[in-house]
Amino acid sequence: MLGRVPMVLLVSPNIKAASVSELITLAKARTEALSYASAGAGSPQHMAAEVFKSMTGVYLIHVPYKGTAPAMIDVLAGNVDMIFCPLNSALPHIRSGKLRALGATSRTRISLLPDVPTIAETVADFESDIWIGMVAPAGTPSSVLEKLNAELRRALDLPDVREKLAEQGIFAESSTADEFNQLIASDQTRWAAVIRNARIKPD
């Protein structure tokens, strides 16, 4: 495990909602469904939105793009209503005031955006961030894995490394190899259920 990248629920200036609860109320009251952009079918943005839909009971129209950049262009233009956006891509637009941040997908509030509540503060148990890790080919000797893991954890403990990563919206987090394997296995189970329930298919 190397770190996590939380996402932020952003809405275009056209959407008159200042909080997650107001967005949910608006979505349920409108006769025309709100739309959300993503970087493509099965992307983290898509998956986060599908979890949000299932946990809140709102209906949202998925508008997939080939990457985050073109998706953001249409949200900024008001052509799409909202997006779950990785923090590093979201920060410039939040700071410029061009997009409104309603909630973070992480378990706790983001230190770079302390005034933005987590979605879980409104939707209990909601969580959908992106983790980053390192894997090695099957059959790599355990002694090599242990050495790599120790060096990675040592590097992630360095204040300047953590600071540089945080500036990019990546929050350093380490683990043992066994803990990381457990995370991968649990996420496979969790997201497989989301994919089945939402009937997500690759582009």
Image (spheres, helix red, strand yellow):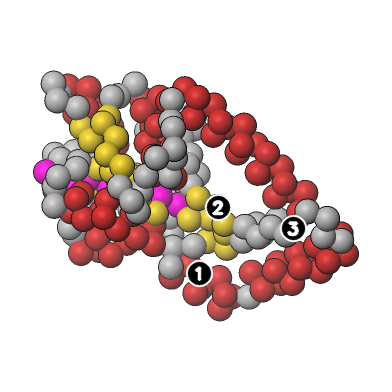
The amino acid type of the residue labelled 1 equals Leu
Find disc 2 in the rendering and name its residue.
131
The amino acid type of the residue labelled 3 equals Pro
Q: Quadrant of the C terminus?
A: top left
Q: Which residues are magenta?
A: 6-14
Q: Are marks 1 and 2 in contact (CB under 8 Å)?
A: no
Q: In this rendering, which labeled residue sits more in front, label 1 or label 2?
A: 2
Question: Residue at the spot x=39%, y=62% of the render?
Answer: 88
Mark 3, other Cα within 10 Å: few <14 / some 14–19 / many ≥20? few
Question: Residue at the spot x=56%, y=31% of the render?
Answer: 192
The residues tagged by marks 3 and 1 sit, at their Cα atoms, a distance apart of 26 Å
Assess whether residue 7 is covered by the magenta stretch.
yes
Residue 145 figure quarter: bottom right
Assess whether residue 55 is covered by the magenta stretch.
no
Find disc 1 in the rendering and name its residue.
165
**With respect to residue 126, does 164 lie above or below?**
below
Q: Which mark is residue 137?
A: 3
Q: Earlier in the sequence, mark 1 or mark 2?
A: 2
Helix, strand or loop at mark 2: strand
Q: Are marks 3 and 2 in contact (CB under 8 Å)?
A: no
Residue 122 figure quarter: top left
Provide residue 189's location: percent of width, then percent of height: 62, 32
- Residue extending farthest to the front is 203
Helix, strand or loop at mark 3: loop
Q: In this rendering, which labeled residue sits more in front, label 3 or label 1?
A: 3
Q: Earlier in the sequence, mark 3 or mark 1?
A: 3
